[in-house]
Image (cartoon, rainbow, N blue to C red):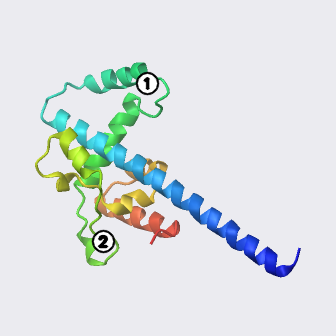
């Protein structure tokens, strides 16, 4: 095979790889957005005492019964989603915003989540885009292994930089 053809093949290979990488990032972003909104929903209902504490276990059992193929929504994971939402939602993002490390992210699914949550001010429930740059496993480790907001922001920013996401 001549050099010119190999170069074209290499270009096509890079296009395929870029497409796969983009698809994986999109899947991760949608999954994290779902976890964020599940966490927001549970947080709101538990804070308002709309639900009792046992309802999360009941929800996990119900989800398993209704959709046995749905994985990753046991009671522990549901509580992690609530923690994920509450910790990051209450974060002071001013440092990262002032240094242009994050901006205001828009989410076309916001209207749907607003209707489900019954909120009049959905922007307060919007997930900062930087969070989608990390895997769910990274988030669990950050939530589990840090003791302050500053540490959480540091590792979020550090891992996003390590992954080459900026």
Using residue 90 as the reference point, say whether residue 157 is left or right of it.
right
> Mark 2 = which residue?
96
Q: Is residue 148 above or below residue 40?
A: below
In percent of the image, x 13 and y 30: which residue is there?
49
* Mark 2 vs mark 1: in front: 1
- Quick check: can you spot residue 104? yes
Residue furthest top as drawn: 65
| Number of dots carrying numbers | 2
Is residue 95 left or right of 50 when viewed as pictured? right
Tell me what residue is drawn at x 47 percent, y 68 percent. 165
- Decide: few, some or many residues near mark 2? Use Cα within 10 Å; few <14, some 14-19, many ≥20: some
The answer to which image quadrant residue 149 occupies is: bottom left
Picture coordinates of residue 156, whole percent (x, y): 40, 62
Q: Residue at x 29, y 64 (%)?
A: 105
Quadrant assignment for the C terminus: bottom left
- Which quadrant of the figure has residue 21? bottom right
Label 2 residue SS: helix
Q: Are marks 2 and 1 in contact (CB under 8 Å)?
A: no
Residue displayed at 36% across by 40% down: 80
Q: Is residue 135 visible?
A: no
Question: Can you give x and y, in whole percent of width and height, for residue 91 in the image?
Answer: 25, 58
Q: Secondary structure at mark 1?
A: loop
Q: Which residue is mark 1?
A: 67
Which quadrant, please, contains the N terminus?
bottom right
In the rendered view, tell whether residue 59 sits above or below residue 142.
above
N-terminal of the two: label 2 or label 1? 1
Q: For label 1, count other residues whose C-alpha is less than 10 Å away and answer few (under 14), some (14-19) or many (20+).
A: few
Instruction: Name the quadrant containing residue 56.
Output: top left
| Real-space CA distance between mark 2 and mark 1, rounded to the nearest whole angstrom | 39 Å
Whole-percent x, y for residue 75 in the image? 37, 29
């Amino acid at each position: 095979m001549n050099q010119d053809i190999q170069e074209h093949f290499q270009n096509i290979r890079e296009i395929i790889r870029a497409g796969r990488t983009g698809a994986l990032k999109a899947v991760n972003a949608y999954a994290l957005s779902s976890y964020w909104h599940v966490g927001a929903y549970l947080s709101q209902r538990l804070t308002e005492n709309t639900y009792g504490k046992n309802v999360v276990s009941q929800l996990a059992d119900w989800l398993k019964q209704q959709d046995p193929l749905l994985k990753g929504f046991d009671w522990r994971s549901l509580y992690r989603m609530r923690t994920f939402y509450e910790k990051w939602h209450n974060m002071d993002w001013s440092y990262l915003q002032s240094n242009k490390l994050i901006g205001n992210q828009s989410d076309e699914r916001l209207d749907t989540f607003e209707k489900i949550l019954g909120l009049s001010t959905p922007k307060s429930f919007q997930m900062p885009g930087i969070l989608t740059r990390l895997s769910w496993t990274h988030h669990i480790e950050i939530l589990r292994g840090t003791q302050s907001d500053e540490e959480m922001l540091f590792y979020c920013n550090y891992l996003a930089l390590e992954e080459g996401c900026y």
